[in-house]
Image (cartoon, helix red, strand yellow):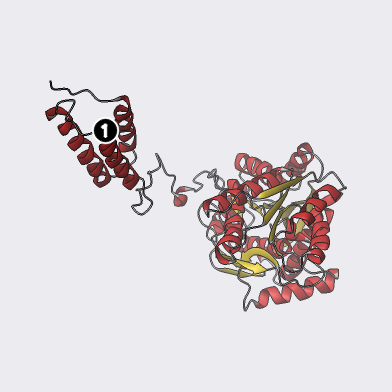
Amino acid sequence: MRSSQISDFEVALLHLAALRWFQISNFKFALLHLAARRWLQISEISNFKSRPPALPWAAALCAALLVCGSPALPQTPPQPYAVIPRDAVNYSGPGRDASHDLRGIEIKIGLLAPLTGPRQNEGKALLQAAQLAMEDEAASPFPGGRRLSIVSRDQSDSWGRATNEIVRLVFDDQVAALITSLDSDSAHLAEQVGNKVGIPIVTLSTDPSTTQINLPWIFRLAPTDTQQAGAFADDIYLERKLKKVILITESDHDGRVGGEEFQKAAHSRGAPPVDRFEIDPAVSNLDSAVSQVLAAKPEAMVLWTGARTASRLLRLFLKAFPTTQFYLSQEAAQTPPSSSQPNVWIVGPSLIENPSRVSFDNRYRARTGELAAPAAARAYDAVRILAASLRLSGPNRARLRDALAAVSDYHGASGVVAFDHAGNDVSDFILARLP
């Protein structure tokens, strides 16, 4: 008696093979198909009693499936449904004619920064750096007797406060461009206004989404969270082969996004789950988190916090763990240690043989008595880049946007700066010791 019946176990394997077919290459599927076809042929020509047992052929089929899923034969990555080319982000609207030029002898640059509250030291550092840049620009007068000035507004407190100050800078102060701090919330608010009104925004925020929505009015002068997380993870897991890693974040938007980026970077490099502690910046008592970290004795620590929290933690942990490697996000690095530390790392452009940075650091320290944080150097460069662009465009926001989009190979205090069409700083960022 002939039989073509197949057991439930065999049917399940065939279903599995069919599912795998949609994810494997033609060559791998051919191997699978050959094994299944041979098996079914034997089932048809053999009677039930003489037919080979299901298990050996099931084993062969499983082996074929394992070959299909083997990482030694990489699969072709899926193609995205659509891609927006970065060079397609542009502005083709009105506003370039002389009737749209800003009036008055002063050409104003707006600075939105935290000038009061817990982050006031960061804001004051940005303002002092911007003022140094204005002094340098004063040595080369603008055509027609025009002169540059800086107008600062405080972003502290609520979103409503920041929105009001942005509107005042744009409409009351009639600034030609806006510079925003490292805070991503303020950067997003500013770019919404900038896109509606048509005014260039230069942000120091590291949030990659500021330039991912393809608005032509924003330019980001900083490494992204993704770039920082990748550089930290490469050094921790691939170079140093460290295992005990602790991530400390703050419970605000920047802390959450940065922490998630580092966790994704660690996972993609095959690292075990990261021990993460989230700190509320409004809570002054950090004893619980500190005691848990001290007990863990980490080999590496990643701080994705504000400068104030990072400064408090570093004072404790640098003394307790002299050989531990510390990795600071851009915000965490805004209050540098009082002396250079060989085991504290940040991500930024290469500063080797950069006389502009040496000059800026010396002048900033002479003015303030403190070391210049990375964002201070970028605030200085933001003003200088805007000034150089304004010399080409004149007091016109649309023409100024065009001049900024053309910035390439600008050698500043923070390194070499170049923007792509989407406003990203395409400089080469590297892992470096915190100066």
Of 205 and 226, which appears nearest the observer? 226
Residue 5 location, x and y as percent? 22, 22
The image shows residue 58, relative to residue 385, as above or below, that is: above
Q: Is residue 99 visible?
A: no
Of 140 and 203, which appears nearest the observer? 203
Of 154 and 414, which appears nearest the observer? 414
Q: Is residue 225 visible?
A: yes
Q: Residues within 10 Å of mark 1 (few under 14, many from 20)?
A: some
Give residue 11's quadrant in the image.
top left
Q: Residue at x 82, y 55 (%)?
A: 308
Quadrant occupied by the C terminus: bottom right
| SS for callout 1 | helix
Residue 399 location, x and y as percent? 57, 54
Residue 272 location, x and y as percent? 59, 51
Give residue 345's quadrant in the image.
bottom right
Residue 341 location, x and y as percent? 75, 71
Residue carrying label 1: 54
Q: Residue at x 84, y 44 (%)?
A: 282
Q: How many marks?
A: 1
Task: Say left or right for 254 vs 84.
Answer: right
Task: Say left or right for 37 vs 58.
Answer: left
Task: Tell me which amino acid carries mark 1.
Answer: Ala
Most extreme residue toward the top, as rendered? 1
Task: Say left or right for 417 vs 67.
Answer: right
Task: Say left or right for 3 vs 173.
Answer: left
Of 119 and 282, which appears nearest the observer? 282
Q: Residue at x 76, y 38 (%)?
A: 159
Quadrant occupied by the N terminus: top left
